[in-house]
Image (cartoon, rainbow, N blue to C red):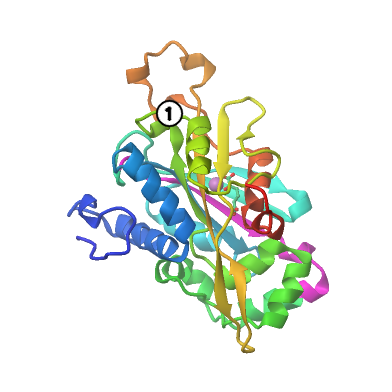
């Protein structure tokens, strides 16, 4: 089925006519994301124009409320139904979060734009560990949303919440305790960010250090939490991200306030030591570092934080 839209970041013509239901669905999740996040879209356009109009995605990420069937499982079901495999769990005790990542059916056969399907990273807020006040707010929205959790993927494709429009009072209550909670209340299941695979870019921005420099030279602000470049303990997973855009949100009690939406991330995965003698042309994604890192992720989460959004210096 051909996808008809002017808002997709990547020309829809590059979605083949044989495109599956699944690819069409995630392409539409992406369109919601590009249409709401002008900075992410400008960065993508910049990378596309500098690197020849085809990119690979390393992963897509989502946030959820880990309670009453609204957590990781509500979103992962869709991906599991289309061939994804659950991989590892990551824990973030001080943020009261946990996450799971899911591998696509193949890393090396190209199905989605310039490459294979993206990995999927889904986190959830450990709601039962929050204060009674925050728990009450989250449970109220979740309870009144019918069986919204069953339709998480649909909500992401449509770009709408499965619960009723929040009040500013509730948003503020959650913001005081967990910025993640407040973000999820107003953004729901929409794509939190997409990540461009830096090592798969073909020109000189095909390593994350040059890519970061290129993006900063164009005036974009990168998340500086713990340093711009986040490096895994083994040195093989390098990540960076922009600071999230904000958008005006119409709260149910009539207040219109700017709230954080999404950012864009870059990841470079280096070749594993056991494959270091393979020639450059023969290196596949499966020869590279896989998975995610708690230390990196902990800092990437901050891309939607008030501290980063209000930071003055570039
Ligand atoms: C996810 C942050 C972690 C990564 O790649 O490690 C992450 C989020 O902000 O929801 O994206
Ligand atoms: Ni990420």
Task: Return the residue found at the far bottom.
Answer: 254
Q: Which quadrant: the N terminus?
A: bottom left
Q: Examine the image and state in which quarter residue 282 appears.
A: top left
Q: Examine the image and state in which quarter residue 25 appears.
A: bottom left
| Residue 55 or residue 228, whichever sits in front | 228
Q: Which residues are magenta?
A: 114-135
Q: Position of residue 43 (x, y in %)?
A: 44, 49
Q: Position of residue 26 (x, y in %)?
A: 37, 58
Looking at the image, is 286 positioned above or below residue 24?
above
130 magenta-colored: yes
154 magenta-colored: no
**According to the image, label 1 marks what residue?**
286
| Residue 256 or residue 25, whichever sits in front | 256
**Along the horizontal axis of the image, is 10 left or right of 29?**
left
Q: Position of residue 8 (x, y in %)?
A: 32, 60
Residue at 39% from the left image edge and 46% from the top image edge: 46
Residue at 63% from the left image edge and 79% from the top image edge: 141
**Along the horizontal axis of the image, is 91 left or right of 79?**
right
């Amino acid at each position: 089925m051909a996808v008809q839209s002017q808002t997709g970041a990547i020309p829809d013509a590059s979605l083949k006519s044989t495109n599956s239901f699944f690819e069409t669905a995630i392409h539409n999740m992406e369109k919601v994301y590009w249409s709401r996040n002008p900075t992410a879209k400008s960065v993508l356009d910049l990378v596309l124009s500098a690197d020849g109009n085809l990119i690979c995605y390393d992963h897509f990420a989502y946030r959820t409320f880990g309670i009453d069937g609204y957590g990781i499982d509500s979103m992962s079901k869709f991906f599991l139904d289309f061939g994804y495999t659950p991989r590892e769990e990551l824990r973030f005790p001080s943020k009261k979060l946990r996450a799971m990542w899911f591998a696509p059916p193949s890393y090396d056969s190209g199905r989605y734009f310039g490459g294979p399907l993206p990995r999927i990273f889904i986190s959830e807020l450990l709601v039962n560990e929050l204060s009674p006040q925050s728990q009450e707010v989250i449970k109220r929205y979740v309870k009144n949303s019918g069986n919204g959790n069953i339709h998480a993927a649909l909500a992401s494709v449509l770009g709408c919440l499965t619960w009723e429009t929040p009040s500013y009072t509730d948003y503020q209550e959650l913001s005081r305790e967990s910025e993640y909670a407040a973000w999820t209340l107003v953004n729901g299941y929409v794509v939190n960010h997409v990540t461009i695979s830096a090592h798969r870019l073909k020109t000189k921005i095909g390593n994350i250090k040059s890519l970061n420099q290129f993006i900063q030279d164009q005036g974009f602000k990168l998340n500086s939490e713990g340093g711009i470049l986040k490096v895994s303990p083994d040195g093989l997973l390098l990540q960076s991200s922009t600071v999230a855009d904000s958008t005006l949100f119409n709260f149910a009690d009539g207040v219109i306030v700017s709230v954080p939406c999404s950012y864009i991330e870059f990841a470079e995965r280096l070749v594993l030591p056991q494959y270091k003698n393979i020639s450059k042309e023969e290196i596949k994604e499966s020869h590279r570092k896989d998975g995610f890192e708690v230390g990196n992720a902990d800092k990437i989460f901050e891309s939607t934080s008030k501290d980063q959004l209000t930071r003055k210096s570039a």
